[in-house]
Amino acid sequence: SILIFTFFPVIFSFYISFHKYDYLSANRPFVGFYNYVRMFTNERFWQTLANSARYTLGIVPLNIVCALGLALLVNNKVPGINIFRTAYFSPVVTSSVAVAMIWGWIFDPAFGLLNWILRLVGLKGLTWLGDPKLAMWCLVVMATWNGVGYNMMIFLAGLQGIPQEYYDAATVDGANSLQRFRHITLPLLSPTTFFVFITGVIGALQVFDQIWVLTKGGPAGSTRTIVYYLWEQGFTNFDMGYASAIAYVLFVVIFILTLINWRVAGKFVHYQ
C-alpha cells in the first residue's frame, strides 16, 4: 500500500510535470521543462509564493509565542488544570473545515461577532475577509487559534522535562522569575522550539483548506497561496502537468528552507 499510495504518486507526478497532461485530452505530449519555464515566468505564481511567505511569517512566530505562553500557564500543579489543558487543546481535534465555517461567521461583515462588538462600542464594522489588507491576517488569527493547542502540548512536555533543581538553584542564587525564564527555560526549551518552528514553517507553506472554505483565494488574489494555486491548476483547469511542476517546486522550496533552518537556527539549539 505504501508503494501504491505514496511512491507511485510521487514518481508519476514528477513524470507528468514534463508533459502537457490534461484530463480532458487523450493527447499528452512531452513538453520538457515548458511547465517549469511557464511557472517561473508567470506573475501569478510569484504572487502566490509571496502570499505563502506572508502567511508563514505571520503564523509561525504568533503560534510559537501563544503556544509557549499557554504552556507556561498550564504547567502548574493546581486542581482542575487538566480541564484547561483539554479546553486549549480541543480546537486541534476539531475539523479545520468546521473551524473555518465558525470563523467565517465571526468575520461576517453583516452578522459577524467581531463587527457586532465593534458596533457596541460605537465603531464602524470592517469587511474582514473582503479587504485585501486584512484577509490574510484574519486567516493567520484563525489558524493560530485552531493549531496553537498542539504546540502548547509539545511545549508543555518540554517544560516538564526541565529538572526542578535548576530553578531551585537559581532561586537560591537570587534569580527572579524573568531571569529564570531567560537563562533556564528558554535555553533548555530550544530543541522543542526548533521542532515547533520547523514543523510550523512546513505546515504553513501547505495551507489550503481554510482558504478554500473562507476566501477562495480572494479578495483580489490576496489569500491565494501556492497550494491553493496548485489546486486551481490541477482540479479546476485540469492542467495536471503544470500543477505537478508547482508541487515539485514547492517541495524544493520547503527542502531548502528546512536545510537553512537546520544550519542557522540549529546553532542556537542546546541539546544538553
Image (spheres, rainbow, N blue to C red):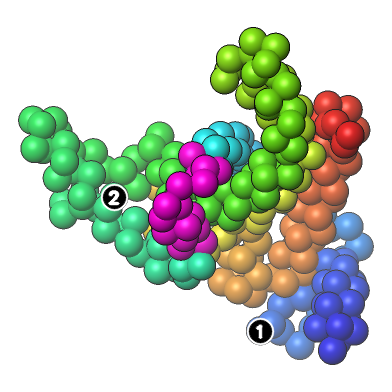
Q: Nearer the viewer, residue 268 or 230?
A: 268
Q: Position of residue 100 (x, y in %)?
A: 40, 61
| Residue type marked 1 | Leu
Q: Nearer the viewer, residue 133 or 120?
A: 120
Residue at the spot of label 2: 107
Q: Position of residue 147 (x, y in %)?
A: 53, 54
Image quarter in which the C terminus is found: top right
| Element at label 2 | loop
Q: Position of residue 61 (x, y in %)?
A: 60, 34
**Residue furthest front as drawn:** 172
Judge the density around disc 1: few (<14), some (14-19), many (≥20) Cα neighbours within 10 Å. Answer: few
Q: Which residues are magenta?
A: 73-92
Q: Is residue 19 visible?
A: no
Q: Is residue 260 above or below residue 40?
A: above
Residue shown at the point (66%, 41%) measured from the top left = 159
The mark tally for this picture is 2
Q: Position of residue 255 (x, y in %)?
A: 85, 48
* Distance (Cα) linking label 2 and label 1: 38 Å
Residue at the spot of label 1: 24
Q: Is residue 84 magenta?
A: yes
Mark number for residue 10? none
First in residue order: circle 2 vs circle 1: 1
Residue shown at the point (70%, 35%) measured from the top left = 164
Q: Does 54 sit left or right of 211 as displayed?
A: right
| Element at label 1 | loop
